[in-house]
Each structure stands twice: as C-alpha cells, then as structure tokens.
Image (cartoon, grey):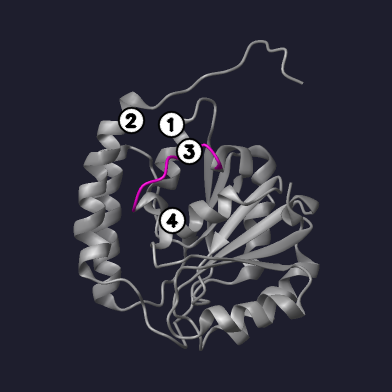
Amino acid sequence: MNATSEYDFTVIVPVYNELDNLPNLARRLSDFIPTSLYRCCILFVNDGSTDGSGRLLKEICGRHSDFFYLEFAENRGLSAAIKAGIDYCGSKYVGYMDADLQTAPEDFNILLADIENYSMVTGIRADRKDSFFKNVQSKIANGFRRMMTHDGALDTGCPLKVLHTECAKKLPLFKGMHRFLPALILLQEGCSYKQVPVRHFKRVAGKSKFHLWNRLAGPFADCFAYRWMKPRYINYRIKDTNIR
C-alpha cells in the first residue's frame, strides 16, 4: 500500500529533460486536481533527466501534497517510465500524459466520463498542431500498426489515456509498449477500449524526444514482436482459492 491508494485516479507524467516546461505543467496539474471527476493525484516519473528536472520535481512535489515522484537511476525510455508509474499506482484508475503540455490535463475528464464502462479510454488528437512531416510519419505508423494488430486505434501516439489499474498492471513490458496499449488491452479477456477526441497544442518549451527512427522504424519492428506475442499471451481466471 502506498500514498496513491488513498486516491481514485493517478496521473502518471513521464519526464525527461523538461526543465522549462515543469513550472507551467505543475500549475496546470494543480489547477486540474480539484476539478477532476475522481479524487486525483499526480505521479511524476523522472526518466534519468540530466537538465535539472529531477531537482525541480522534488521541489515541486514538496510544495504539493497531491504530487509524488519516482526517479530512475538512468534513462530507460517512455514505456519504462509509464510501466513504473503503473507498478507503483495504488488507485482504481490510472492515466498518463506527456510533460510537454501538447495535451491538456483538463481533458482527462472527457476520458474519465466513460472509464466505468471500458477498460481503457484513449484520446484522439483533434486538429493536431504538429508539423506536416511529423503528421505524415504518424499516419504511416498508425496505418501500419492497425494493419498488423487489427486494434482499430486511430491515434495510439496520443499521450492522454485512462485505464483501470487492474488491467494496466497486466500489460507486458517492452520498449515501445506505449504505442500498443489498445492492442495490448484487447489481448486481455473481456477488455475493451473507447476513443474520444481531445485537444492538441503546439509545444511551447523544450524539445521533442522523437525522431524518424523512434517514430517509424522502431514501431514497425515492434509490430512484428506484437504479432509473435499475440497468440502466446496468457489469460486465466481464478475459480477458487483459500488465500485470504
């Protein structure tokens, strides 16, 4: 049992070298908490930042009773940061968003409105504010992934998702996992997800951590890994036990 178990909803925010974004991010998240449909806390995961983000995160969390943090010993990537947040989450629901504020924490309430009826609710970035080249890359990657996984997801790169923590904890860990959350949720017996439009904004501070390789080539290879894993994924239900 940890502090997040006192809440109904935990927002995981992976952070890697986002020093310039953190003050505004903390303010926006602090403003969102009292408006959340479920009692909410924030769990930052410092993914081995080297720009002072870790120090500032600790200061921010010291000033906000609903803010918590995890700090990696070294950089492990976005999927590892999300999975670590899930592993340390004790609330009924868990969500995540990027630290770049290209999506709005207020839009979590759009997702939370449907979470009781689905295993996961994920955003679709409406009117994306990214460059033409970046949008083309995303469309190609999303189209290839849908063809390989048949998950029907339109925008797995949208960094705004809410899940039942019980389902989230069953997700297999591998690099690139965050791009396959709809497909991985559908592997779990009886699970489903819903897609809803959310707002999207231009990055105003910091630099994107994504480039051609980790937006296209890496995900293409991961699709084949998913196809290998899909028929091997283990589902089971406990009929009876004497463990109490």
Mark pair 3, 4: CA separation: 17 Å
Instruction: Name, please, the residue furthest toward the front.
Output: 73
Position of 156 compared to 216: left or right? right
Name the amino acid, label 1.
Leu
Residue 162 shows up from this direction: no
Q: Name the residue under label 3.
A: 185
Ranked by sequence position, the earlier of labels 2 and 3 is 3
Ranked by sequence position, the earlier of labels 3 and 4 is 4
Quadrant hosting residue 234:
top left
Mark 2, Cα crowd under 10 Å, few <14 / some 14-19 / many 20+, is: some
**Residue found 61% across the figure and 16% down from its top:** 238
Quadrant hosting residue 207:
bottom left
Residue 153: within the magenta?
no
Q: Residue 195 location in percent, x, y?
A: 51, 50
Q: Tell me whether the residue at label 1 lies in contact with that at label 3, contact meaning CB atoms closer than 8 angstroms.
A: yes
- What SS does tag 1 mark? helix
Front one among 188 and 67: 67
- What SS does tag 2 mark? helix
Q: Mark 1 points at which residue?
A: 187
Mark 4, Cα crowd under 10 Å, few <14 / some 14-19 / many 20+, is: many
Mark pair 2, 4: CA separation: 20 Å
Q: Tell me whether the residue at label 1 lies in contact with that at label 2, contact meaning CB atoms closer than 8 angstroms.
A: yes
- Which region of the structure is painted magenta? 169-175
**Residue found 52% across the figure and 36% down from its top:** 170
Q: Tell me whether the residue at label 2 lies in contact with that at label 4, contact meaning CB atoms closer than 8 angstroms.
A: no
Query: Is 85 rendered above or below residue 230?
Result: below
Name the amino acid, label 2.
Lys
Q: Name the residue under label 2.
A: 230
Most common SS among magenta residues: loop
Q: Residue 223 location in percent, x, y?
A: 25, 44
Residue 184 shows up from this direction: yes
The circle drawn on residue 80 is: 4
